[in-house]
Image: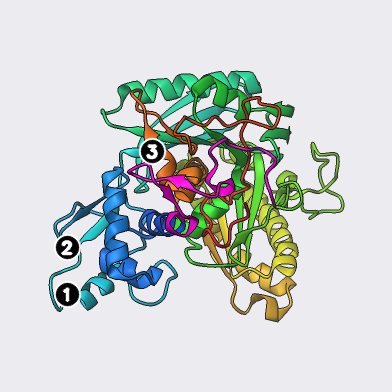
Amino acid sequence: MTEAVGRGGDAAGRDAAVGRAGAVRPPAVRNNTARVLRLVHEDGPITRAELTRRTGLNRSTTLAIVGELVERGLVHEEAAGTGPSTGLSAGPPAGTSASGAGPSAAAGHSAASVGRPSPVVRASADVVAVAVTVEVDAVTVALVGLDGSVRDRAVATSDGPPTAAEAVETIAVLLDRLVSAGSGGLRVVGIGVAVPGTVRVEDGVVRYAPHLGWHDEPVAGPLAARTGLPVRATNDANTGAWAERLYGSGRGVDDLIYLNGGASGIGGGVISAARPLSGAAGYAGELGHTFVAANGIRCHCGAVGCLETEASRDDLVRVTGVAADDPEALAAVLAERRPEVERVVDRQVAALATALRNAIHTVNPEVVVLGGFLGVLFDHVGDRIETAVREQSMSAMTERLRIAPAALGADVLLRGAAEIGFRDLLRDPTTISTNTSGRAAATNTSGRAAATTTTSGRAAATTTSGRAAAAEEARPA
């Protein structure tokens, strides 16, 4: 699907880009550079030998591409075994590859270690995307490094949901505070905003965020105008689904359902055949409004018996007496198994199992990932949810099914939002230049900074519905 919003210097729409020496670079060269950077970002730290193996490029080409990325400050190289701990990297767990099978980067090093050990390539922690989550009670802004590290974050809490204009101003203020307080040399390349609602693909307008009370509210455009950075907005659960596929419980899985339970209800995201399922306008995956109870509670959407009314964080908070934003306290009270709490748990487990049955029969996922309070609930009931789902489902549908809590925990939506912020950089690393403010901007073929504009020339940005980090050949334009 082609986005209606252009970017002046958008790599996806150009026939050439400007290289280090100002020469015009053919698309194949740009694509190879992007492939290497994406591998380092998503699967690194990774040896240069493993990059050669994974890309199919020859060693001299890989050497040249890594050298250019080093020169641009996007990655750095170090001798094997001499680098810092990889605990904050975006790479796979020790001994695994990005796909969950086959040789890891360490294995690539072993294969290359007959001679001189292959250098390890790491993404820069100083190249950052701004990750934003907007909830009814808080706006969170974080700086996430290209290496996957959450560099810093700031939270502004409120007693009620902010208006769209208030959210934009809060984001801008928190970002300025983070950048001012951060260490020198940070390069901010973009902003990704995760919103609990439906976000239109064409222009990034939030069509409907019921818990926030937003109807047809522009967010990406005003924020781009306010900050001078490219901004993209998307549904929050879609970002969570993609983050869990890249770095969490669904790592390397091509078919995945993600459900996130938070202050703004239950949101869903679907990955099908390794691509986010977005629908005609980017609204697919509203699993929180799956029908689960004929005599249920009326939902704010107008229907009766939606999942998010039958399995509600507010109900659990009310019966347990814990703070809404304290999952550890919620888990501790659930462990007491008080009768009045277990009655609520039983009702929510039944509703969740029915919703998952519906989704599984539609999507046939390999993994279902539960985030937010749903992850806490899953940890409490153990196999009960999976057993209930299997009892209601066709056996063939659940043969390969695995249900798991979100591995990224509280950072899952931030990591997903950061992927959207990195989108332009990962599509074409040669378009990024750094200005004196430390905020990086995409450049067009004339070398001028390219604004994010609609066809009418107004500042805007587009939602990617979670597609920001898909492999270049699999991601829609």
Q: Looking at the rendering, which quadrant does residue 207 occupy? A: top right
Q: Write down the residue under mark 3.
A: 128
The residue positioned 34% from the left and 73% from the top of the image is: 53
Q: Write down the residue under mark 2.
A: 80
Would residue 292 appear left or right of 159 to someone viewing this image?
Answer: right
List x then y, in percent, for residue 60: 27, 66
Q: Is residue 258 above or below residue 149?
A: below
Looking at the rendered structure, the kind of residue marked 1 is Ser
Mark 1 or 2, nearer chain start: 2
Q: Are discs 1 and 3 less than 8 Å apart at CB?
A: no
The residue positioned 15% from the left and 69% from the top of the image is: 117
Label 3: few (<14), some (14–19) or many (≥20) C-alpha neighbours in 10 Å: many
Looking at the rendered structure, the kind of residue marked 3 is Val
What SS does tag 1 mark?
A: loop
The answer for how far apart the CA atoms under marks 1 and 2 are is 10 Å
Nearest to the observer: residue 274 or residue 247: 274
Residue 289: say if magenta.
no
The residue positioned 47% from the left and 34% from the top of the image is: 446
Q: Which mark is residue 113?
A: 1
| Residue segment shown in magenta | 1-30
List x then y, in percent, for residue 440: 40, 32
Q: Main secondary structure of the magenta part?
A: loop
Mark 2 or 3, nearer chain start: 2
Q: Is residue 181 above or below residue 75?
A: above
Mark 1 or 3, nearer chain start: 1
Nearest to the observer: residue 149 or residue 304: 149
What SS does tag 3 mark?
A: strand
Looking at the rendered structure, the kind of residue marked 2 is Ala
List x then y, in percent, for residue 172: 49, 21
Nearest to the observer: residue 96 or residue 333: 96
